[in-house]
Image: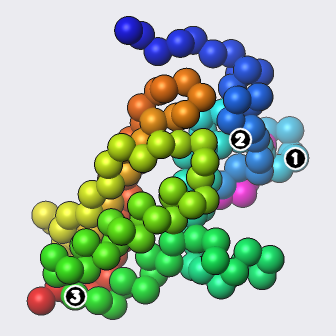
């Protein structure tokens, strides 16, 4: 079964819209907006990059991955990263259903951890993949 074709206007209604992340100026000189699947992806990135306590009105918002920057890259640390990502996204992003989260050592940099999030957009059933790299201190 192929994915449904959705127009930009319908996408914005399904998934919402907000200021782009990172914030940027559009070609018309105004702040750029994102909508649809891109908005969901940008919100996931915001959740993963935000430290709990960083937002005054939402003290528990975010994932807090920065706390692992100076931890050794051990199996235990990788497991904790996966658990934190799963908990944060399940709590703060209702437009997705998490399929899988992995955290593995980057083969090219012993200080880096590659995090992969595979999720399904609830409104359409489309599966997406997001990857990011967390760089920190050398593992032991």
How many numbered dots are placed on residues in this image?
3
Q: Position of residue 119 (x, y in %)?
A: 42, 42
Label 3 or label 1, whichever comes before in sequence order: 1
Q: How is the image coloured?
A: rainbow
Q: Residues within 10 Å of mark 1 (few under 14, many from 20)?
A: few
Q: Is residue 29 left or right of residue 18?
A: right
The stretch in magenta equals: 22-26
- The disc placed on residue 34 is 2
Give the mark nearest the N terminus, 2 or 3. Answer: 2
Q: Residue at x 83, y 50 (%)?
A: 31
Who is closer to the viewer here, 76 or 91? 91
Evaluate whether residue 112 shows in this view: no
Query: Is 120 displayed left or right of 42 in the figure?
Result: left
The quadrant holding residue 99 is top left
Q: CA distance from mark 3 to mark 1?
A: 43 Å
The x and y percentages for residue 24 are 73, 53
- 2 vs 3, front mark: 3
Residue at numbered disc 1: 30
- Mark 2 vs mark 1, foreground winner is 2
The C terminus sits in image quarter = bottom left
Q: Secondary structure at mark 3?
A: loop
The secondary element bearing badge 1 is classed as loop
The secondary structure making up most of the magenta span is loop
Q: Nearer the viewer, residue 30 or 11?
A: 11
**As drawn, 76 above or below 107:** below
For the residue carrying disc 3, how many other residues have a C-alpha within 10 Å: few (<14), some (14-19), or many (20+)?
A: some
Mark 2 to mark 1 CA distance (whole Å): 13 Å
> Mark 2 and 1 residues: CB-CB less than 8 Å, in contact?
no
- Mark 3 highlights which residue? 72
Q: Is residue 94 above or below residue 107?
A: above
> For residue 71, what is the image quadrant?
bottom left
Task: Find out whether residue 99 is within the magenta segment.
Answer: no
């Amino acid at each position: 079964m192929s994915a449904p074709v959705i127009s930009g206007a319908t996408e914005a209604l399904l998934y919402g819209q907000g200021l782009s992340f990172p914030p940027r100026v559009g070609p018309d000189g105004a702040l750029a907006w994102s909508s649809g699947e891109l908005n969901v992806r940008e919100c996931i990135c915001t959740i993963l990059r935000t430290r709990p306590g960083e937002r005054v009105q939402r003290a528990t918002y975010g994932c807090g991955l920065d706390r692992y920057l100076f931890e050794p890259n051990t199996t235990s640390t990788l497991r904790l990263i996966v658990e934190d990502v799963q908990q944060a996204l399940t709590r703060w992003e209702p437009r997705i259903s998490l399929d899988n989260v992995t955290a593995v050592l980057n083969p090219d940099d012993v200080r880096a951890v590659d995090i992969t999030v595979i999720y399904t957009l609830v409104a359409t059933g489309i599966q997406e993949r997001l990857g990011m790299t967390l760089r920190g201190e050398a593992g032991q």
